[in-house]
Amino acid sequence: MHSLLTTNRFVPAQMYQAVTAFIDKISALCDVLQLDLAPFQLDHIAMRINDRQLAEAARNAWLNEGMEISSAQINGRPIIVIELENPIMLGRWSTRYLELPYPAQGKSYPRQGWEHVEFVIPSGATNIDDFLQDIWQRFPALEQMWPTLEQQGITVKCSAPKGEGERLANPTIAFRQGDICLKLHPHSLAQVIASEHQI
């Protein structure tokens, strides 16, 4: 099982080494979008895995680095959240939360490894339209370039993903360029997970 992780570069030590190049790409995307996210919380970092056996192996390996705090079914597959004992340093940011989505059936990505980070942009919005208006108000340059993003090779997806039992609306805006993705939402993973236990 360890050889499977090593070959695919999913051993935690290998993935820690890959963080710098990944966050440099994220920072470059922020620059293109004219998003100054320095004051905001980097909520979590997520990996992308195409093979279920590899996902199981990665899950077990990363449990040596922390504790599983959530396993939610979202869009028909498990998404695991691990709270790390030591935060991952990501340039000017850091996070203790690692998201490990199992592969979606019938879907394969050209590249495995670190795939996205999510930032918390505080907002009272409960739907994607209101959240988008809040984002545009906070980052007016982004609103101006919005119609031209696709021409710059940036795809945008607005959604409201929700796990079974979650009560907290968390509209999400995702910006994808190449093999990386940057997501913005109003609530942290910890808040969303806590909402699962509210009666």
Image (cartoon, rainbow, N blue to C red):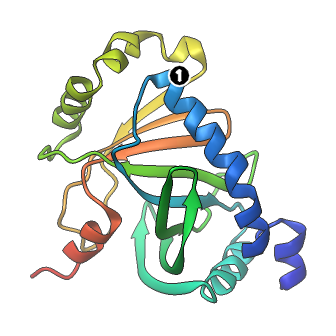
Q: As rendered, which of 135 and 109 lies closer to the eye?
A: 135
Outermost residue toward the front in this view: 92
Residue 127 image-quadrant placement: top left
Residue at screen point 79% across, 68% down: 14
Query: Residue 147 placed where, x, y %?
Result: 40, 11
Q: As rendered, which of 100 and 15 lies closer to the eye?
A: 15
Q: Which amino acid does label 1 sit on?
A: Val
Residue at screen point 43% across, 44% down: 183
Q: What element carries label 1?
A: helix
Q: As rendered, which of 19 and 45 lies closer to the eye?
A: 19
Query: Residue 32 placed where, x, y %?
Result: 53, 22
Query: Residue 134 placed where, x, y %?
Result: 19, 32
Instruction: Indicate left or right for 179 with 78 as reference.
Output: right
Tell me the residue that label 1 is attached to.
32
Q: Is residue 162 above or below residue 55?
A: above
Residue at screen point 62% across, 60% down: 47
Which image quadrant: the N terminus? bottom right
Query: Residue 136 placed where, x, y %?
Result: 25, 24
